[in-house]
Image (cartoon, helix red, strand yellow):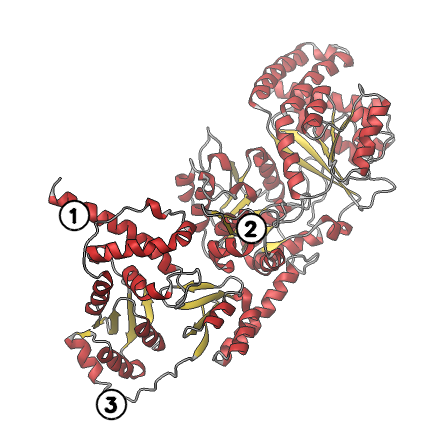
Amino acid sequence: MTDTDIIMTKQQIKEEIHNAVMFIADNCDGAESQDGVGFNGSDTKFGNRAAEMEPEEWSDAMCWEAYQMLAKYGTQLAKDGLNYSDLPVPERVGGDGRDDARQASYERKTLKVVDDEFVLKFKYEAGLIRRVKKLKGQWKQNSKTWTFPIHEDVGGELRNLAFDYGFVVTEEAQEALDRFKDVEVEERPEGLRSLSLRDESFILDFDYDADLVYAVKTLTGRKWDSKEKVWVVPKVACDQVMMLARTWGFEHDKNVFLEALRMSDEARLREEASSAETSKLKIEGLGAIHPKTGEKLELRPFQVAGVAYAIDVKKCFIADEMGLGKTVQSLAAVHMEKAFPLLVVCPATLKSNWEREVRMWLPEKTVHVVDNKVGVKNSDVVIINYDILDKQQEELMKVGFQALVFDESHYAKNSTAKRTKALKKIAKAIPENGMVLALTGTPVLNRPVELVSQLEILGRIEDFGGSWNFRKRYCDAKHDGFGWNFGGASNTSELNNMLRQTCYVRRQKEDVLKELPTKARYTIETQLSRVSAKEYKAVENDTIVWLAEEGRHSSMADALAKLMVLKRIAGEGKVEAACEWIDTFLDSTDRKLVVFAHHRSVVNALAEKYGGLRVSGSDTMKARQASIDLFQNDPNSRVIVLNTKAGGVGITLTAASDVLFVEQGWTPAEHDQAEDRCHRIGQDAESVSAFYLLAEQTIDDDIYELIAKKRLVVDAVTDGEAEVTESVMNELIGKLVKRAND
């Protein structure tokens, strides 16, 4: 081994140990006692000096001294995922590492003039830091220097400070200081406590007081700035800060008080807006006609209120309960802000639904869907799924998006996942005045730690004092001797209030139900499983050929048999997507769900997965009633699966107000009757939400469109079922034949 190798090995060891020392120093709050935060009293000076120095400036004695010192701080190091036993062991040498650090600190005190400013460079020393902070200079992190204007307000004090602490003063700096030798210097009284504002955060500056430090640690989102040695508190805690300032006698000017009042009013108004049901906002320029049904499209009052909130906050959650129109609210907000191009990130099963919504509400905008075969293209709206986000990240970063919407935002709850890391980088590139919106119907208080990465993507984590403070305050942080556990929940009421005051709008069905129609219908676009999609395409091609050559001359029964094969393949191919949707529903609410399907294979698969409650043609009347009674009366029985024919009439399922159709019938009446199993006398809710799961590039879309149009025709409600079925089938056959000719 060469001498160079030995030196490099030592340097690497110093860097490893220096990083560990830096972590403890960054969490040090200035306490001179053992309080579990930063260095103990006996280590404070040495630890901070060592952290401020560069690793290459450490002597071997300092490295050994630092290594020994870190043995006391194993628990704190574990916060950063670092085990003390994993640190490299430096060579044991003689000498006093603490004296070395002190001497290095002294030798590095310099005062010079650069670009018409005084520049101070020195290593950490508590008393010196307090003196420098009184001058209200500017800390430059990159150069690790303090800068001050060449002015009599600071010149006299700097002159005294340089003399008291033995600064090496350049000739140019000395000449500048001598200009202020006759300036009288007012000493700041010891124990002065000041409150100021910086970047809409409160700055608490005070000499160490154990009781006061304890009080500051109760403030929501507080964070210790280890460089400037001050406490930083986000504006959302303005009421708490002003109460503490009055109690502990902090000095502040009138502007701070007035700004705190403004912040307090703003927080209360935003909290009210987070659950608002109406707004005076006028939304213009959205699409007005449903492209398939011809229905007039308008945002409901509570949706307008959600749009107004998003426009005001710009980077926030739209967390309305499922079925309340989060998609259209996000599109309307982006539209009103003219924040295009827009990137939409969503689960793969929702891409088609997003494309449909964009074309419906923003017909003048171009839209492009990214997949494994088609890469990123310039468009007003670009839609991509989470699974391929990291692969397309580089190309996406080139587009210059002005807005980002990430749907089902819980997909980004894992901070270590590739998609989450990619999403953070993309979000960071959105301009400050752009929009970043997270859509989710999942309650926030189940596992608060899952919010950390989502808040980071939104750029809102600092409102809560950073990720570590968030975890410690709201995730019931516990250390088991091996590492930290953040799987719990704590201070949940405060968290909810904080979210609503900063970046979270949520309305529940029960709160805005009066704004909904008697029945609200929603479509969910999805994709068939890979195997089913391949089988469906082959059968569809055969069916189209048959219809074109023989179908027009065959019986309706023959045509129905062909179409039913397609429906069966589509139904079985949607089971996986249906399970994903049902899982999301159950996680997002405590309500129950009624599921309708047609084919036995689909009914059985879903019933077996979700508790076994079912109503089908093969069940005995006793078994059917047992399932119904259990669903109606047992709070833990949340899903029942029914065959549309067997369970669509004659039963009551008022324990639920949400219905999912995995497969469709042929008539509006068939669907209406099934929906009415929930919406009937005894239903506490004022509305039933019916969700229709439609498979992309299948006859699902065609059938839904035809049935919706029939529902709009007044005569359709009085037509016999057979007549309507025949009418729908004839039009469907016509569509397939036309598709073959095209």
Question: How far across and down, in percent of the image, does residue 485 sit?
Answer: 51, 47
Establish if 14 lies above or below 112: above
| Disc 1 element | helix
Q: Which one is closest to the eye, mark 3 or mark 1? A: 1
How much space separates mark 2 and mark 1, taking CA atoms?
57 Å
According to the picture, the residue beneath numbered tag 3 turns out to be 182
Establish if 585 lies above or below 213: above
According to the picture, the residue beneath numbered tag 1 turns out to be 7
- Give the residue at x 38% y 55%: 73
Question: How far across and down, in percent of the image, does residue 561 sit?
Answer: 73, 14
Question: How far across and down, in percent of the image, does residue 230 sit?
Answer: 41, 69
Establish if 282 lies above or below 557: below
Establish if 673 lies above or below 7: above
Give the residue type that dot 3 points to. Asp
| Disc 3 element | loop
Q: Of the numbered discs in the image, which one, if any, rests on residue 276?
A: none
Q: Of the numbered discs in the image, which one, if any, rests on residue 334?
A: 2
Could you tell whether 236 is left or right of 578 in the image? left
